[in-house]
Image: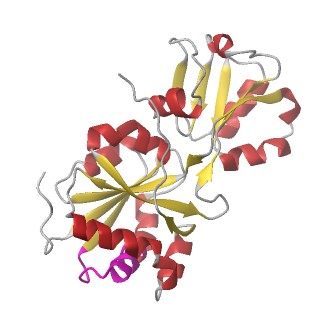
Amino acid sequence: MSALLSAAIATLVFCAPGYPGVAGDAQPFLDQFVSSAVVSAGWPAGSLAGIYDPTEAGGLAKLGGPDAVLAFVPYPFFVEHAAQLHLTPLAQADVAGIGTQQRWSLVVKKGRVTGPASLADLTILSVAGYAPDFVRRVALQGWEFPAEVKIEPTAQILSALRRAAAGEPIAALLDQTQAAALPSLPFASELEVVRESAQLPVAVVAVIDSRLSASRARALQQGLLKMGHVAGGADSLRALQLNGFVPPQLPTYTAAP
């Protein structure tokens, strides 16, 4: 697709399936963020708009719109849809309380799983369950577990852990924040971590389908990297629970055939 004309208004789509958030509530913070990003990048005022969607389907619909040129998404979403949307990573988010990378942990009832084959009758529940390619090939890379394993999304991870502890055929794939809270649960002694991922990016800003010229993309990348040091930038980052951005360093993985 041809590069977006510099005079046109571009849209950044922020999509975080599985995490709390309501589009209307998030919009003022996203507006503040894109305004600061434009200033930091040296783009014309008003040349970037932002829109938020908390669902995978809604996010994909917005990302497919003709004015959508940038995606700000969790890494599982990037893995699942990068090929479809032709996403080119521009920057990697440094998330408050987490950092630029995190590990994912597979949690099951203690003694239930001794290896990949033991997952055959289980359903893996996760905030990243909408991204089965991420779960199988990235978070659980190296585990050749049975094809019949079900992978499903949930925003109710505490309920999933309680069900697993009670003996239901459930495994829970936790992000770093969720895993850190695991020992505090009253039924934590009934659960165990059987697999941890490598360190993986938390979230990525990417260009969609080459819809930005190289010069505009480069200016925005530099603007994001220094955003915490421009007027209002640090405040807009904090509003989205961000420390800032770093150059993308994404791991390699084998995409689904």
Depth order, front residue of 64/247: 247
Q: Is residue 158 above or below residue 181?
A: above
Left of 122 or right of it: where is 20?
left
Q: Is residue 45 magenta?
A: yes
Residue 76 in percent (x, y) is at 48, 41
* Magenta part of the chain: 33-47
Residue 228 in percent (x, y) is at 51, 79
Q: Is residue 175 above or below residue 32?
A: above
Q: Is residue 114 magenta?
A: no
Q: Residue at coordinates 50% horizontally, 66% vertically from top-left?
A: 245
Depth order, front residue of 81/257: 257
Residue 68 in percent (x, y) is at 24, 57
The quarter of the image holding the C terminus is top left
Depth order, front residue of 35/227: 227
Depth order, front residue of 80/155: 80
- The colour scheme used here is secondary structure
Q: Residue at coordinates 34% horizontally, 78% vertically from top-left?
A: 41
Specify the principal SS of the magenta part. Answer: helix
Q: Residue at coordinates 53% horizontally, 31% vertically from top-left?
A: 135
Q: Residue at coordinates 56% horizontally, 63% vertically from top-left?
A: 94
